Image (tube, rainbow, N blue to C red):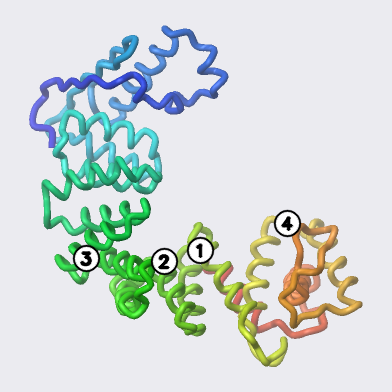
């Protein structure tokens, strides 16, 4: 917390400033002379600090940048304001400002924690670990700092140090859902499935809204050949985060499960998860198309289907002019069925996929 209205000053190397923060193209930056570039840097830093309710003075020299600021109110906390930039997804400005402000307040624990996590997310694990190590030294019982440190070590491939940090966090608080989930993930990486499973199950119970916990449960269930649990877990991921990267990964896992399982029932004789996933993929694909764009796809697949599709083989051996990609027989049938439900609702498309379509439509609308 800022204690006074005194000016604070730091000096940073000019090379530490990321020119992409200027919001100019590479060509526009190249056209600036030294004076123009320095003025642009000064204005950008000043504007960033002013956005945090700070008064600022910035001088850009040949090699160094001098930055001075002070709060307009004793209640303003510029580090917390910079953290808000990270929370809003503005990583470039948030990271730069936190780095800058921490030079003046190097033991600010909130700043160390949030900058460490942000750099870890950005793949800058060496600096992230350095910051989080400093935080843990300042606050050895900070369980969240230990979790973040463990994750950063894991991302760097240092499983031993990751395990050490996460086990300490778990020891401090066995009910911390992130310590539980990430420690379970480390045990999975170490091949210790039986130690990992109860932790990952517990993580889903402690935080049922965490898609990463459910994804971990799906992964470990696949390893244990527990298809039903894996299927439920990956569906939960899609329900929670269908359009995110982890949601897309869950869809791929569900499709893989469905395609690799030996199933004795054919389409129409019971629900097929593989058909449901193909229907979901078709719904997502077709949502960006109008009816005029969709009709050629429907009719081309329907005409090809008159010769028969091999719906029991996962081999992607069918291709169409109206839609990109290669398709398995069942996939083609599902795409045709979904298109038909929109263009020709109620039309008999040759086989009953109503149950699979209904499930897919429910998942599609839930996102």
Where residue 105 sits: x, y (%)? Answer: 15, 33
Q: Are marks 4 and 3 in contact (CB under 8 Å)?
A: no
Q: Looking at the image, which residue is at 70% across and 61% down?
A: 286
**Within 10 Å of the Cα at label 2, are there few (<14), some (14-19), or many (20+) other Cα atoms?**
many
Is the residue 206 above or below the residue 348 in the image?
A: above
> How far apart, in angstroms, are the residues tagged by discs 4 and 3?
50 Å
Q: Helix, strand, or loop for circle 3?
A: helix
Left or right, 127 with respect to 354, comes to left
Q: Helix, strand, or loop for circle 4?
A: loop
Where residue 81 sits: x, y (%)? Answer: 26, 38
The residue that label 2 is drawn on is 211
The residue that label 3 is drawn on is 167
The residue that label 4 is drawn on is 289
**Mark 1 / mark 3, whichever is N-terminal:** 3
Q: Are marks 1 and 3 in contact (CB under 8 Å)?
A: no
**Mark 3 / mark 2, whichever is N-terminal:** 3
Where residue 267 sits: x, y (%)? Answer: 72, 86
Q: Do the residues labelled 1 and 2 touch (CB within 8 Å)?
A: yes
> How far apart, in angstroms, are the residues tagged by discs 4 and 2?
29 Å
Q: Which of marks 1 and 4 is in front?
A: 1
Q: Looking at the image, which residue is at 34% across and 39% down?
A: 85
Number of numbered labels in the structure image: 4
> How far apart, in angstroms, are the residues tagged by discs 3 and 2?
22 Å
């Amino acid at each position: 917390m800022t204690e006074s209205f005194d000016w604070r000053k730091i000096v940073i190397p000019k090379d530490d400033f990321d020119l992409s923060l200027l919001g100019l193209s590479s060509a526009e930056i190249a056209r600036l002379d030294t004076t123009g570039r320095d003025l642009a840097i000064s204005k950008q830093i000043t504007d960033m600090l002013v956005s945090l309710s700070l008064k600022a003075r910035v001088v850009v020299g040949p090699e160094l940048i001098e930055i001075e600021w002070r709060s307009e109110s004793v209640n303003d906390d510029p580090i917390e304001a910079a953290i808000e930039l990270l929370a809003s997804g503005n990583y470039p400005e948030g990271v730069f400002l936190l780095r800058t402000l921490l030079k003046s307040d190097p033991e600010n624990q909130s700043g160390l924690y949030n900058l460490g996590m942000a750099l870890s997310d950005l793949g800058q694990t060496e600096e992230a670990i350095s910051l989080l190590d400093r935080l843990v030294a300042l606050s050895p019982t900070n369980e969240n700092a230990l979790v973040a440190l463990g994750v950063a070590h894991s991302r760097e491939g240092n499983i031993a140090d990751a395990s050490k940090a996460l086990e300490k966090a778990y020891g401090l608080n066995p009910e911390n859902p992130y310590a539980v989930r990430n420690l379970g993930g480390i045990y999975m990486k170490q091949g210790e499935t039986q130690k990992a499973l109860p932790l990952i199950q517990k993580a889903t119970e402690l935080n049922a809204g965490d898609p990463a916990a459910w994804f971990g449960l799906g992964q470990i269930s696949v390893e244990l050949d527990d298809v039903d649990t894996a299927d439920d877990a990956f569906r939960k991921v899609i329900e929670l985060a269908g359009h995110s990267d982890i949601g897309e990964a869950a869809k791929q896992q569900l499709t893989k499960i469905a395609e690799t399982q030996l199933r004795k029932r054919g389409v129409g004789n019971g629900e097929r998860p593989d058909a449901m996933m193909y229907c979901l993929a078709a719904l997502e694909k077709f949502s960006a198309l109008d009816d005029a764009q969709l009709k050629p796809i429907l009719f081309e697949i329907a005409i090809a289907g008159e010769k028969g599709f091999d719906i029991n083989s996962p081999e992607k051996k069918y291709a169409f002019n109206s839609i990109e990609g290669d398709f398995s027989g069942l996939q083609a049938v599902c795409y045709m069925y979904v298109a038909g439900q929109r263009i020709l609702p109620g039309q008999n498309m040759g086989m009953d996929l109503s149950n699979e379509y209904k499930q897919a439509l429910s998942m599609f609308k839930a996102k």
